[in-house]
Image: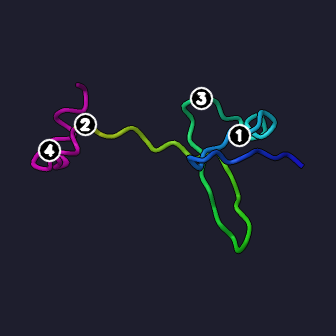
Amino acid sequence: MITSKITSKAQTTIPQPVRDALKVKAGDEIAYHIEGGRVILTRAKRAPADDPFATFGEWSSESDRRAYADL
C-alpha cells in the first residue's frame, strides 16, 4: 500500500509510483471521483482549446465560418 501525509494546509504529494501509473507530470490535472467511502483518482482529460472567436456571437453564422475558414 502506498501512503502520503496531509499537511496542515490540506496538501499532499502524490507518490512517484502513483504519478507514473497515471502518467502525470507537473502542470497536469487530476480528477477525483467519490464512490461511497472510496475516492478514485484519475488523470483529468484536457479540455479543448478555447475558441478565441466564441466571444463574438455576431460572427458565429455558417457564412462567417466559411468566409474566415482560411485565416
Measured in 3D between alpha carbons, the distance from the residue under mark 3 to the one under mark 1, in whole angstroms, is: 11 Å
Q: Which residue is mark 3?
A: 26
Task: Categorize mark 4 by other alpha carbons within 10 Å: few (<14), some (14-19), many (20+).
Answer: few
**Res 52 label:** 2
Task: Categorize mark 1 by other alpha carbons within 10 Å: few (<14), some (14-19), many (20+).
Answer: few
**Res 14 label:** 1
Measured in 3D between alpha carbons, the distance from the residue under mark 4 to the one under mark 2, in whole angstroms, is: 9 Å
Span shown in magenta: 53-71
Camera-near label (2 vs 3) is 3
Say what secondary structure mark 2 lies in: loop
The relative height of residue 31 versus residue 25 in the rendered view (above or below) is: below
Measured in 3D between alpha carbons, the distance from the residue under mark 2 to the one under mark 3, in whole angstroms, is: 26 Å
Q: Amino acid at mark 1?
A: Ile
Q: Marks 1 and 3: in contact by CB < 8 Å?
A: no
Q: Tell me what residue is drawn at x 71 percent, y 35 percent.
A: 23
Q: Marks 2 and 4: in contact by CB < 8 Å?
A: no
- Which of marks 1 and 2 precedes in the sequence? 1
Residue 12 placement (x, y as % from top left): 66, 43
Camera-near label (3 vs 1) is 1
Q: Marks 3 and 2: in contact by CB < 8 Å?
A: no
Front-most of 61 and 30?
A: 30
Furthest residue in direction left, as rendered: 58
